[in-house]
Image (cartoon, rainbow, N blue to C red):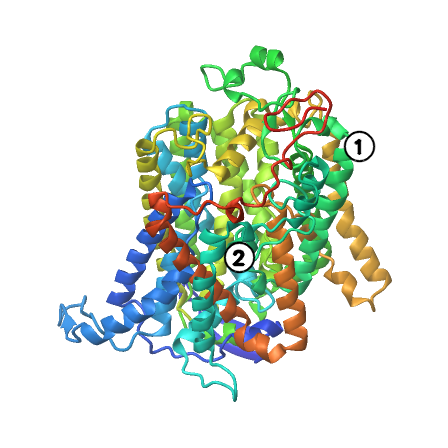
Amino acid sequence: MDTRITLGDDGVAKKIEEEVADECPIRQVELTVPKTDDPTMPILTFRMWVLGVVSCVLLSFVNQFFWYRKQPLTVSSVCVQIAVVPIGQLMAKMLPTRPVLEGTRFEFSLNPGPFNIKEHVLITIFANCGAGSVYATHILTAVKLLYKRKLSFVPAFLVMLTTQVLGFGWAGLFRKFLVEPGEMWWPSNLVQVSLFRALHEKTGRTKGGLSRTQFFLIAMIGAFAYYILPGYLFIMLTSFSWVCWLGPKSILVQQLGSGLEGLGIGSFGVDWPTVSSYLGSPLCSPWFATANVAVGFVLVMYCMTPLSYWFNVYKAKSFPIFSNQLFARNGSIYDISTIVDSQFHLDRNAYSASGPVHLSTFFAMTYGMGFATLSATLVHVLLFNGSEIWKQTRRAFEGTKTIDIHTRLMKKYKQVPMWWFIVILVVNLALVFFSVQYYIESLQLPWWGVLLACGIALFFTLPIGIITATTNQQPGLNIITEYIIGYMYPERPVANMLFKVYGYISMTQALTFLADFKLGHYMKIPPRAMFMAQVVGTIISVFVYTVTAWWLMATIPNLCDTSMLPADSPWTCPMDRVFFDASVIWGLVGPRRIFGDLGEYGNVNWFFFGGAIAPLLVWLAHKAFPGQKWIKLIHMPVLLGATSMMPPATAVNFTSWVIVGFLSGFVAYRYRPEWWKRYNYVLSGGLDAGTAFVTILIFLTLGSKGIAVDWWGNNVEGCPLASCPTAKGVVVDGCPVF
């Protein structure tokens, strides 16, 4: 036990007792993160500000520009992480070293020395702000383009800004529990740490092997060269659904084999975007988490969904087996515009005449699993982490805690005072209340809805943060937020969307900020510098995202309107379409008419009970058989929430992700630990970078000019009947009638 006297944020001397461990409690961190620090490195330099702000602006613009396309392109911060190294080194050679504003309190140097790793980390934090999308963009799209209602720029910008910044408040409250403990290791950060080390450390190569830098360059160049095939010349490689070929005229065979519109049996993709686009890189997922996702996917996709469909539960055969569309009773796509009145509320008479909204089997199933995930999250954290949370809380108040080597090294830097976070939270809440009150006709959400949404986000940030920080999987709150406000304030779609964004996305943003704080923790970045980069980068990115979205809405005719766009138009907005459908189910029609006493899907509510029981059974099994360590690795929130990204994710995304995750997290980690330690995360970064660079190149040189290769290998997967219904008398264009 090490006892010392230190000054707190308020300047008061405090006695702190710490149990210091020189090793990390997590082996992956022990193998990846350096245990040294150089506090003399300059960080807030001129080149950091220039490269950071420019990176944030460029990524915000590019990602919003591609957001609305049929195949959305997300340019990750990895591209910037690599590209700025030669630029930073060039600036270190070319910029003058003479101080600017010499002799004043504002004196600084344009060139304080070699381009260093800590500058590089902060530039990447700026880039992360631009790389992560602004979820509230969905609201703008749904209101203006899909509901075709008026929404002015000012309330739109305020919604975009406040939803992104609100998470800082929750992050500040829980950073001591989710950043400082070594057990909270945030697996995805290890990819970034490996890449930083590969780009900056001059490590020699092993005998007959490669250095990290050499391996990264080979992986990046290989990914760059290879992706020309699945990205342009042979698109079928993105979903190789060979089972469909066994029955070219059979709906059943194609439902089984299609990786995009069916169950995906035997389907796989051999391109990196298919593998990593929705679940993240499988190379940074712990094997136990990957295994839980795999079991959850098999349970939903290969057991529950086909049984429900083939037993015709809720008239499932009248609709496709896998679809996120909303259907009328006759199997046709539901015309939502016919049930919205002039006040942007549900027209009850029109809805009675048109009949209820119907969901595909899989769409209904994913909502049920979302219910189960929520209750499972609470029970799991209570049973498996409750005592740890209580101990950490008690130690935080008593001034006693156990720290690892990285937390000890960070003690030399000034921490971010709690009142900084509180000020941001209070100011942000004031803006939110002003927005919803002043623009109540446009936004529909009352003030009490804001308080309730914030309460939900505050309550769930810690338990979901623990799951994310230890498994790299993040159960979402989107369904429960929609459910609550849908019952309390029904028939108002904008209020429902806004409540979801404030209740769900503010928590997600908090976890993003905490993950970045942990990255800074690993790389020994002063917390106040990290905080500054996050705040400034977030504000810049929100402005650029909003302006870009507004410009595209005004520039592209019929954006997102598939009924008005040409068949080959890329501007179909698939992700916004899912969000719009959810706003109809939970906001316009309301959960009572879908899952309540007025709806057809009431039995789906039993998933709440099942989700609560599942982790209890695992806990009891663990207590009954304490020698069986594998039982504790059954993580019900991850298992039940495995399919939370479906749709828009499809079966082929999951099958490909699980295969790669098994090869990395089980085979390589167990049988080639030295290779895994040296190259695993570097490989992930190289694949990200090479694929992103060539995707942009293909779009700029070929895609933007409409140049395509027309042959059977570019027919995506060749399963045209997979989306057909199988009920008698249901007529759909291109499908046989039974």
Please tell me whether residue 91 is drawn above or below residue 488 in the rendered image: below
Q: Which residue is mark 2?
A: 271
Residue 162 location in percent, x, y?
40, 41
Q: Are marks 2 and 1 in contact (CB under 8 Å)?
A: no
| Kind of residue at disc 1 | Phe
**In front: label 2 or label 1:** 2
Seen from this angle, which residue lies furthest bottom?
A: 207
Residue 283 circle label: none
Residue 479 as seen in the image, left or right of residue 39: right
Pick whichever, 277 or 512, lies toward us: 277
- The type of residue carrying mark 2 is Asp
Q: Classify 285 as above or below 196.
A: above
Residue 341 placement (x, y as % from top left): 48, 15
Q: Is residue 676 left or right of residue 412?
A: right
User: Which quadrant of the figure has residue 250?
Assistant: top right
Residue 18 shows in this picture: no
Side of 577 where 253 appears, left or right? right
Residue occupying image coordinates x 70% and y 45% = 246
Q: Callout 2: helix, strand or loop?
A: loop
Image quadrant occupied by the C terminus: top right
Which residue is identified by label 1? 311
Q: Nearer the viewer, residue 64 or 111?
A: 64
> Relative to 188, does residue 38 appear above or below in the rendering?
below
Q: Using a 10 Å C-alpha cutoff, classify the residue at mark 1 as few (fewer than 14 neighbours), some (14 to 19) or many (20 or more).
A: few
Which element carries disc 1, helix, strand or loop?
loop
As drawn, the residue found furthest toward the right would be 624
Q: Position of residue 405 (x, y in %)?
A: 53, 77
